[in-house]
């Protein structure tokens, strides 16, 4: 069976946990402190499929704009990460990510809420709820969403399995009707 290679760009806010997801998935490690960005595209084979994912990390560099534009342009799939801690900054940045993604309406998007382990140590009102995560995913026109923790290795592999599943058979788990705003 010939293999199919798909490029996946991992984008989202500074310290939202992008590199930690890739490290947990590919190397089964989690680092509590500063995590340096992965420099190259990381290629992984998805079990029980002929699909290879070329995963690209992004990081806040001096030339971040051109860096993520390059990633968005090359990627076949976009993974938008944001952490479950709800702050005014996260909300306003999500709106900015939404605008950036609108320039590439043809790229399938998977929305990923990260650091879900923090829900157990914070008040419920300080975190995005499941319903709010679903709403955010809809607002991006995402085909699906995942809630994960790289720290506890919860649902990390599901991110890449859902992409592989979508490559094999495109699906939309979410209603696409309300792309206009993010309700939080
Ligand atoms: N509690 C918790 N902390 C996490 C999790 N994932 C990442 N972190 C922590 O969050 C911080 C940032 O993680 P990174 O993976 O470097 O985030 P990033 O999005 O790659 O950050 P930049 O490359 O700077 O944009 C680190 O201190 C991680 O240990 C998680 O699932 N739970
Ligand atoms: Mg990083």
Image (cartoon, rainbow, N blue to C red):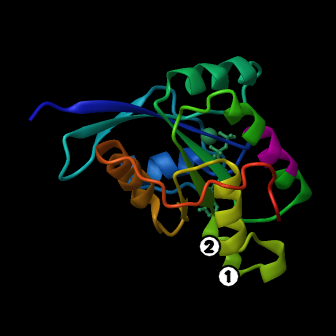
| Quadrant (top left/top right/bottom left/bottom right) for the N terminus | top left
- In the rendered structure, does residue 109 fall within the stretch colored magenta? no
Camera-side residue of 26 and 133: 133
The label shown at residue 117 is 2
Tell whether circle 2 marks a residue whose Cβ is less than 8 angstroms from ligand 1.
Answer: yes
Q: How many marks?
A: 2
Tell whether circle 1 marks a residue whose Cβ is less than 8 angstroms from ligand 1.
Answer: no
Alpha carbon of mark 1 to alpha carbon of mark 2: how far? 6 Å
Compared with residue 30, is residue 180 higher up or lower down, i.e. above or below? above
Please state the extent of the stretch shown in magenta in the rendering: 92-97
Query: What kind of secondary structure does the magenta stretch mostly adopt?
Result: helix
Compared with residue 170, is residue 145 higher up or lower down, i.e. above or below? below
The label shown at residue 120 is 1
- On the image, the x and y values in percent for residue 41 come to 43, 28
Residue at 46% from the left image edge and 65% from the top image edge: 155
Local crowd at mark 2 within 10 Å, few (<14), some, or many (≥20)? Answer: some
- On the image, the x and y values in percent for residue 81 come to 63, 49
Local crowd at mark 1 within 10 Å, few (<14), some, or many (≥20)? Answer: few
Residue at 62% from the left image edge and 51% from the top image edge: 17
């Amino acid at each position: 069976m010939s293999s199919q290679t798909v490029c996946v760009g991992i984008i989202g806010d500074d310290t939202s946990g992008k590199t930690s997801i890739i490290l947990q998935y590919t190397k089964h490690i989690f680092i509590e402190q500063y995590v340096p960005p992965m420099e190259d595209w990381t290629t992984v084979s998805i079990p029980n499929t002929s699909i290879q994912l070329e995963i690209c990390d992004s990081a806040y560099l001096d030339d971040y704009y051109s860096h993520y534009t390059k990633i968005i342009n090359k990627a076949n799939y976009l993974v938008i990460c944001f952490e479950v801690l709800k702050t005014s900054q996260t909300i306003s940045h999500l709106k900015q990510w939404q605008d950036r993604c609108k320039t590439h309406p043809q790229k399938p998007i998977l929305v990923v809420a990260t650091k879900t382990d923090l829900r157990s140590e914070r008040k419920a009102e300080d975190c995005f709820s499941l319903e709010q995560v679903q709403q955010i995913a809809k607002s991006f026109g995402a085909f699906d969403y995942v809630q994960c923790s790289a720290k506890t290795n919860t649902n990390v592999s599901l991110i890449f399995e859902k992409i592989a599943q979508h490559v094999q058979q495109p699906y939309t788990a979410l209603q696409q009707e309300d792309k206009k705003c993010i309700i939080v």
